[in-house]
Image (cartoon, rainbow, N blue to C red):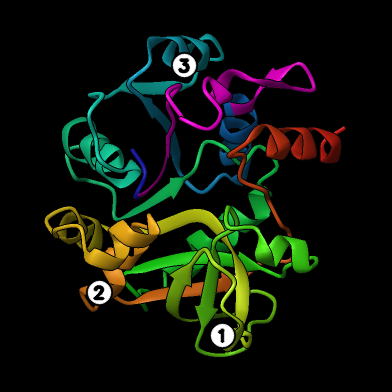
Amino acid sequence: MTDNVIIIPTRLEASRLPNKPLKKINNKEMILHVYEAAKNANVGDVIVTSPNKEICELITSVKGTCVITKINHETGTDRIFEVFDKFLKKKPKIIINLQGDMPNIDPAAIQTLSNYMKKNLCDIATLGSKFKDKDEINNINNVKVLASKVLSNNQFEEAIDFYRENDVSKNKNIYHHIGIYAFTKEALIRYVTLKRTKRELERNLEQLRALDNNMKIHVGFTSSSPLSIDTEEDFKAVKDLMK
């Protein structure tokens, strides 16, 4: 067991795009693209976690590790913690939560996040990239992160806010938030004991629970822009990108 672990939570019951982890891109299931990117980052053990037997059977068919978790978790981080607590016995020092719907994630971006966390400068670290155009900024499915300063390559700054709506009053230091988080062991243990906050529930963004409880989140810049797949339109766009 390594000090770093990447845990990929995924499930078949997404309301907007059911069964999306098993949808194929270039004749390969989406979750396998994410799993292989995590393995290629070579920063630690990789575990897929899901309540669905079909996903775990797929991962084990390629000699990967998959842990079946209970169905009724409120958030992906709760699913991560179940694996960290029961399967890994709270041993890893850095836990990377990689969303299972980003098949074009760059392994180098995962490496950047992992390397920064080793500096022990924050509770949680995540990544952001530039928006390509106004359509991307205005899309409520694209989460925005407000940084304390302008970001440049491999540089991290404090994350001040996260939101979905395009707020023109916050048009400086805004980046396209990428769905990957790295927790210190202590931060993850603390996070799951906290109650869901008003802002978290209103915006449906669980990272706000951390900010609302004075946990320090740093965001780093990556030039790659992996897209989260939430809708059929997203799926078609990513398929085109990955041709």
What residue sits 67% from the left and 64% below the top? 138
Mark closest to the chain's N terminus, 1 or 2: 1
| Mark 1 lies on residue | 170
Mark 2, secondary structure of its residue: helix
What residue sits 41% from the left and 58% below the top? 182
What residue sits 20% from the left and 57% below the top? 196
Instruction: Kindly report the distance in space between the C-alpha atoms of the residues bearing marks 1 and 2.
Output: 19 Å
Mark closest to the chain's N terminus, 1 or 3: 3
How crowded pointer 1 is (Cα within 10 Å; few <14, some 14-19, many 20+) is rated as few
Mark 1, secondary structure of its residue: helix
Q: Is residue 200 above or below residue 53?
A: below
| Mark 2 lies on residue | 212
Residue type at tag 2:
Asp
Instruction: Kindly report the distance in space between the C-alpha atoms of the residues bearing marks 1 and 3.
Output: 40 Å
Q: Are marks 1 and 2 in contact (CB under 8 Å)?
A: no
Q: Would you say 111 lies left or right of 91 here? A: right
| Mark 3 lies on residue | 55
- Nearer-the-camera pick, 19 or 220: 19
Which tag is nearer the camera, tag 1 or tag 2? 1
> Magenta part of the protein: which range?
4-30
**Where, quadrant-wise, is the C terminus in this rendering?**
top right
Residue type at tag 1:
Lys
